[in-house]
Image (spheres, rainbow, N blue to C red):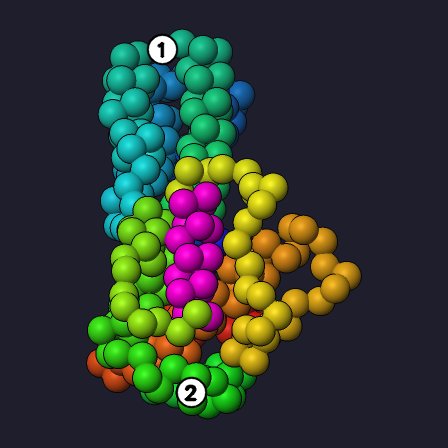
Amino acid sequence: MSSPEIAPGPARNNQQYLEFAIPVLSFGSTIAGILAWGAGYEISFQFFALGCVVASCLLAYLAWIRPRKDIVALSTPLYAFIFFVVPTDFASGATLQLLYALSLTLLLVRLKYRFGTVHTAVSSGKELAVPLQDYASRTSSAVTAVSPKTGHRAALAISRFTMGDYGEAARIAGQSDADLPGFLSRAFAIAREHALILDGCLPRPGQFLTFPPEDAGVLAIPPLPEESEEQRFDTALDNALLVLFTTAWNTAEADKPHLLACREFLVKLLGE
């Protein structure tokens, strides 16, 4: 399963612009300084560190607006100030700034794929994509006896997953409810197992939770005999999240706007 990217509309576009600006500013200001020195303008190279300082602030902002905070990215403005407040000569300044620009770019990639993207709580759309609507309709009878409270918990677990807040997703999925259908209990358990693995950056375990053959009727993605262990592992999570989706959609009316906000992520689980 790939990292969730669900922040829709202007919010997502603005985030992409800021992400693009980080390497442009950090490398651009340093390269501009090198070109200026090559042209004979002996300006203090310290001034060309401004792009790295601004890029550090942008990276810290992107880390701050995420539900899970990356302390390394948040601290980059402090390092930028320490590194560049003291005047330096051309050779050492250019080298340091280029290395720092590379570090900022790597931290940006880490932030994007380890800590998720910004999540927008409510979508402006009012309809599910057709594949999701078909799946929710097909499985509605299987979850009609589930309480709205459990449906709300399923919606919360999905929301936290899409936000990249895996620790909280594991906590929510691990809560206990009485008299749940077996497939739903397994969906929560599988979501919790994967959330803990993602939260701890752990490798795939040799033994992992899956759905038994008797749950096939409520699964959106039929497991295939020729699947590898890695594919079975990923399919188990995709099916678990989709089971939580149909549970929430069919039992927790108040959570539908939040589920609609996650629909792009959920459609990707179906391979659409």
Residue 263, horizontal then vertical, whole percent: 42, 74
Q: Is residue 96 above or below residue 237?
A: above
Q: Secondary structure at mark 2?
A: helix
Q: Residues within 10 Å of mark 2 (few under 14, many from 20)?
A: some
Outermost residue to the right: 226
Residue identifier under label 1: 88
Q: Residues within 10 Å of mark 1 (few under 14, many from 20)?
A: some
Outermost residue to the front: 179
For this view, does 119 lie left or right of residue 198?
Answer: left
Q: Is residue 196 magenta-colored? A: yes
- Whole-angstrom CA distance, mark 2 to mark 1, is 67 Å
Q: Disc 2 or 1, which lies upstream in sequence?
A: 1
Q: Secondary structure at mark 1?
A: loop
Between 12 and 70, which is closer to the camera in this rendering? Answer: 70
Query: Which segment is the magenta one?
Result: 183-198
Residue 128, horizontal then vertical, whole percent: 42, 84
Between 253 and 52, which is closer to the camera in this rendering? Answer: 253
Between 122 and 244, which is closer to the camera in this rendering? Answer: 244
Q: Residue at x 32, y 17 (%)?
A: 83
Mark 1 belongs to which amino acid? Thr
Q: Residue at x 67, y 51 (%)?
A: 229
Q: Residue at x 32, y 37 (%)?
A: 70
Residue 67, horizontal then vertical, whole percent: 27, 50
Q: Residue at x 36, y 64 (%)?
A: 158
Mark 2 belongs to which amino acid? Ser
For this view, does 191 lie left or right of residue 159?
Answer: right
Residue 33, horizontal then vertical, whole percent: 44, 26
For this view, does 84 lie left or right of residue 23?
Answer: left
Residue identifier under label 2: 140
By secondary structure, the bulk of the magenta-drawn segment is best described as helix
Q: Is residue 87 above or below residue 163?
A: above
Quadrant in which the N terminus appears: bottom right
